[in-house]
Image (cartoon, grey):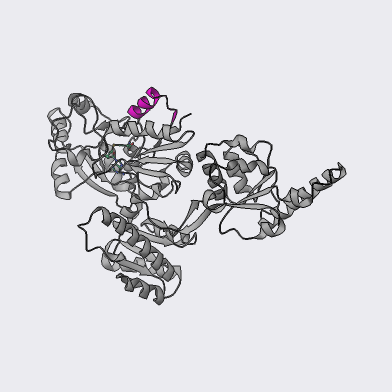
Amino acid sequence: MKGTVYLIGAGPGDPGLLTLRGKEILEKADVVVYDRLVSPAILGMCNPKAKMVDVGKMPTHHKVKQSEINRLLVQFACEFPGGVIARLKGGDPFVFGRGGEEALELVAAGVEFEVVPGITSAISVPAYAGIPVSHRGIATSFHIITGHEKADGRTCHPERSEAESKDPGQNLSLDFETLAKCPGTLIFLMGIANMDFIARRLMECGKDTKTPLAFIEKGTTPYQRTVMATLETAGEKIARENVTAPAITIMGGVVELGQTLAWKKNLPLAGKRLVVTRAAKQASGISARLTALGAEVIETPMIETRDVIPAKAGISSADFNALANFDILAFTSTNGVESFFRQLFAAGYDVRVLAGKKIASVGKITEKKLLEYGIRCDYVPEDHTGEGLGRLLRDVVNKEERVILSGERSSESKDLIESRILLLQGNLADDTLLKLLPQATRWVVYETLPVAELPEWKREAVAGADAVVFASTSAVENFCSVILSGERSSESKDLNRESLTTPASCSPRLAFCIGRMTESAARKHGYETVTSDETTMDSLVKKIVEHYKKES
Ligand code: SAH
């Protein structure tokens, strides 16, 4: 059995434009193979335990060749039997995304796959600039064209191709005669480097030199920019305004509607990337508010979980046979469910070892998680608490005890029955259940630890940010130690780097802080600080907005 590959469209940039289906798969992915244009916010939605593979730039900062990507997908499908391999691509996977080629390879290798369409930049990016691709009386069709196709008919890799094109236009095999006659809206992807050539050829073939066109750079992201031109000024505008990839070019009468319909507000934090450190779950409030003000927020949680059955439960991972000693398995968190099954499967077992056992869950969310593994719960307490679960299992055990006693097998003591309950929990779970079920056995299946390291993609996102937001001294300390440990490990690969010794030198220099204590902790680590007047999130958000208003 191999894993399944999901070719997922990430949409054009705004993380809100990822589909629900795409998000659902990313949350449970074992591996995520992603392209350069995918936003950090979407990478942040992926299962934190997933192996993240950047094929836009890897491993020595060269993009991975398409044939290598195809090979990797098949390899991961074999390495993760029954697993979920997400192939995450910008926009829609089948719109100049080479999704078709990848799918063909998967078919050839006998790997199952699914396609999760995405919102293509071709239509959504103009929409974010207030340009409808069709409009009654102006354009009755629209045409999506690659501005970068090799003469042999292969489109180049969508990432980078613009920047890499040394010989504008030479490779293009477009039928300019037909395109010039086409009355509909023309939308060029990957066309910036060749646009001067494309515009000239279209004019030579008779297209009106005054045709309005717009270049939309980094559309739908906080960095979106629209530059208007006409066919005759296209090349000159690109050079003068320094239009850079990723950008699309849209041509035709509909472009003029953009003057009236440009709806995207110029938000006060547009174009700013802010790192929000979270001690636990509490920072989501501030992230949402900064996002609503136009910022791109990189959340860096400071705790993580790790599987631990072999170490903590005193059994080797191959010793899941011990499960035979238990009749009831009780789960108290989705993390517990995931860790348990991950380790069970890794040790070569499958769900059949649970045959005949009763399964208990503390609440509905854990129950739902179990259902994902094909397991229906026998016991879920009404009140969804550890105490409720403990009492419920007590009752179950007592009832069984009565049955056994009335069946005159009185040698089976109550203790023995209770000891057949196995609790599968994290190291921070309190003792409520154990207290109510003193003879039960507990396996710690996962541990919660301070985050030791940021994933590569997140370190890069942090390095490219404008500022860090700190709400407590512990957030400062945790963040700095994580950043420094990441730097040390990359420094060891690159011994020539000597200067990177303070957190502020490998993350943005500016820190927005709540409270004087937080401020002095951040200063101690070399940050320049801007501190809120009051120790509230409201006051901090206000301060951040004021800071950037002053700057501009
Ligand atoms: N599959 C993608 C397109 C891949 S080709 C899709 O459906 O959108 C890559 C090209 O898409 C880029 O060169 C650029 O022309 C365009 N593009 C992708 N994202 C964009 C964005 N956010 N803003 C402007 N253009 C974008």
Task: Give coordinates of residue 196: x percent, y percent.
Answer: 14, 38
Q: Is residue 116 visible?
A: no
Q: Nearer the viewer, residue 163 or 499?
A: 499
Number of numbered discs overlaid on the protein picture: 0
Is residue 426 shown left or right of residue 545?
right
Question: Image height check: is 175 above or below 132?
Answer: above
Residue appearing at x 33%, y 54% in the figure = 459
Q: Nearer the viewer, residue 275 or 28?
A: 28
Residue appearing at x 36%, y 65% in the figure = 480
Task: Give coordinates of residue 319: x percent, y percent.
Answer: 57, 43
Residue 112 is one of the magenta-drawn residues: yes
Quadrant of the image for the C terminus?
bottom left
Residue appearing at x 67%, y 60% in the figure = 432
The quarter of the displayed image where residue 494 is located? bottom left
Q: Nearer the viewer, residue 255 or 413?
A: 413
Q: Secondary structure of the magenta portion, mostly?
A: helix
Task: Give coordinates of residue 411: x percent, y percent.
Answer: 82, 46
Dividing the image into four equal quarters, which quarter contains ligand 1? top left
Q: Is residue 342 visible?
A: yes
Question: Image height check: is 74 above or below 424?
Answer: above
The quarter of the displayed image where residue 272 is located? bottom left
Is residue 79 shown left or right of residue 210?
right
Residue 14 is one of the magenta-drawn residues: no
Is residue 395 shown left or right of residue 357?
right
Please report the bounds of the magenta region as a residue range: 100-113
Is residue 279 shown left or right of residue 275?
right
